[in-house]
Image: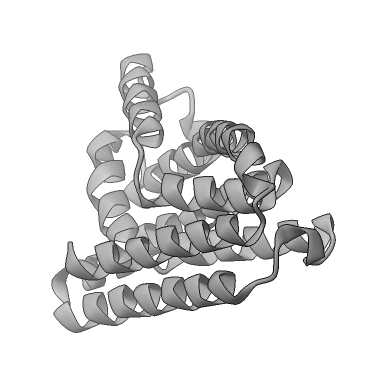
Amino acid sequence: MLELLPAIPAATWFTFLAASIALNLTPGSDVMFISASAAAGGPRAGVAAALGISAGSLLHVALAVLGVAALIQSSQAAWLILRWGGAAYLLWLAWGLWRAPPPGRTTGGNRRAWRAFRRGAANCALNPKVSVFVLAFLPQFADPALGPLWVQIALFGLVFALGSVPVNIGWALAASALGAPIRRAGRMMNRLAAGVFALLAARLVWE
């Protein structure tokens, strides 16, 4: 795979990286998830959620390489299953946060960060729109003359996922800094995050 790196024209890399950065900077459901996690759980939880989102995107890259994303795009049933499954998961998170005690009485930082990572990965993995986006976005930069398309798609997808890490961490740190004064209110911050997750679930179902 790495031998294809020098074969891909510099202009293609420049266009791809510019588009990737712009897309990662655009606020969306992932950014809202990261921000809510950071505001409720602090910088460690926010960074963990950001890393989880980036890790979850690798699943969609793998699906695009295997061609499964094409099935999701063409099958209404597969789309509905993933969409409703993702919405149900977000609602489950919202319910748990709504009932959670104030941050001062929750588990330790490491355990909370691991939970935020798992939730971030699942939030991204259960979003079928990400899979369809990856399928539509990555092949635009692949050239059959340079080698196997699946290898190029995998390479671009890996770069895209890795490039999202610093951007997502930036969103997490910003949200944590802004959320610190509010976190002192305890339960109110948990319920605010729960409302965000519930809105994300509604957006996933109705868009």
Relative depth, front residue between 22 and 154 = 22
What residue is at 57 percent from the left and 31 percent from the top? 174
What residue is at 40 percent from the left and 35 percent from the top? 24
Could you tell me residue 163's position as x and y percent?
A: 51, 33
Q: Quadrant of the C terminus?
A: bottom left
Q: Is residue 67 visible?
A: no
What residue is at 52 percent from the left and 35 percent from the top? 171
Q: Is residue 121 above or below residue 9?
A: below
- Left or right of 20, for residue 121: right
- Left or right of 18, for residue 48: right
Relative depth, front residue between 75 and 51 = 51
Relative depth, front residue between 131 and 114 = 114
Q: Is residue 128 above or below residue 109?
A: below
Could you tell me residue 56's position as x and y percent?
A: 51, 58
Q: Quadrant of residue 176?
A: top right
How many numbered marks are there?
0
Q: Quadrant of residue 73?
A: bottom left
Could you tell me residue 43's position as x and y percent?
A: 69, 41
What residue is at 43 percent from the left and 75 percent from the top? 91
